[in-house]
Image (cartoon, rainbow, N blue to C red):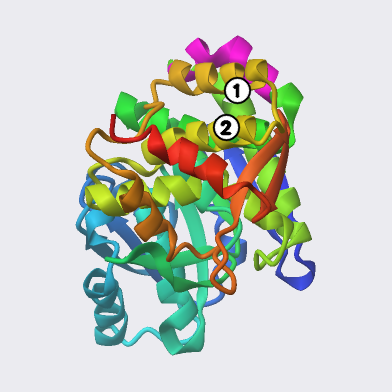
Amino acid sequence: MQQLTVNLDDRSYPIHIGSGLLGQPELLIPHIAGRQVCIVTDDTVAPLYLERLCRTLEGYSIMPVVLPTGEAFKNWSTLQQIFDALLAARHDRRTTLIALGGGVVGDMTGFAAACYQRGVDFIQIPTTLLSQVDSSVGGKTGINHPAGKNMIGAFYQPKAVLIDTDSLATLPEREVSAGLAEIIKYGLIRDRDFHVWLEDNMPALRALEPTLITEAIARSCAIKAEVVAADEREGGVRAILNLGHTFGHAIEAHQGYGNWLHGEAVGAGMVMALDLSLAQGWISTDDRRRGVELIAAAGLPIAPPQGMQAEDFRRLMAVDKKVLDGQLRLVLLRQLGEAVVTADFAPTNLDSVLAGVGQ
């Protein structure tokens, strides 16, 4: 097992990474204050792992809440199911919520924990590659709005993150590729050596070779923990974690949440960010090629959906959370391994990138 720490002073918390962790109560019990535990999961994950987690927490008063699966259900009405269950079972302020599932479950459980009785504890147990390397770490919680992804939510940190790599064995290939998108992101924005390592090992990572995928998860979480510790509420450097996301969120909203997986949309979005970085003269043609080839090697799309037009991107990107005072900011690359959040790009270069979509 590997252990990392997200350093946030008195709100610091561990990230445990390894095989078989779901059956180790000693990793969970120190973070459960009371006797009441609400396990929030979905109808895909529940048949696979809910019973095992309940056995691990034997002796606690456990209430499962099983939500419908998918990004299409990341909304107010689904969130209300969690509150309804907590209130019906009279869970108090010492209750602990546990998110058992992918990013949708984790985001909604964290948001519910931030809101219920003005804040109760929660633990993240992510079961998809994407949630293990991204959404479970850092305390971003929330739900979608028809006008934009994750537009309603809160920064609220978990008490612990438990990453059991055994859960990856049940992932469809498409979900593995979606998770690899976020792993590739870390190399592009922060760690050129990691990017080279990913180039060398992508086939084995797609095959979920245990040692290599554990290393990729650990390196990704270490980078994210470092960035979050420096800028918890995304007032500055943390925004670099959104490489490709402004374009990607527009794709998700346009296509209907869940039709393109988040990682698929981010993959295409990162290509658009590479194209704009190249147009700015900030990266070389070779850097752009290497980035695009790695995204493609992960089994991800490298272009937006057919039929999505430039005006669709402009309309949807106008409500992105990085828009400040009406000015769009994007995460772009100065070189492989170095990202910048900037509004200082030529509008004509963005026009050129957008002109190529929908072809």
Image position of 310 with respect to 317: above or below: above
For the residues marked 1 and 2, what is the alpha-carbon distance in whole angstroms? 6 Å
State if disc 2 and disc 1 touch (CB < 8 Å).
yes
Label 2 Cα neighbours within 10 Å, binned few <14 / some 14-19 / many ≥20 = many
Mark 2 is on which residue type? Answer: Leu
Determine if residue 22 is in view.
no
Label 1 Cα neighbours within 10 Å, binned few <14 / some 14-19 / many ≥20 = many
Q: Residue beneath label 2, please?
A: 274
What stretch of residues is rendered in magenta? 195-206
The secondary structure that most of the magenta stretch takes on is: helix
In the rendering, at what x and y percent does residue 38 appear?
A: 37, 69
Label 2 SS = helix
Quadrant of the image for the N terminus? top right
In this view, the residue in front, 354 or 49, is 354
Chain-order first, disc 1 or disc 2: 2
In the rendering, at what x and y percent does residue 8 appear?
A: 75, 65
In this view, the residue in front, 59 or 216, is 216
Classify residue 125 as left or right of residue 257. Answer: right
Label 1 SS = helix
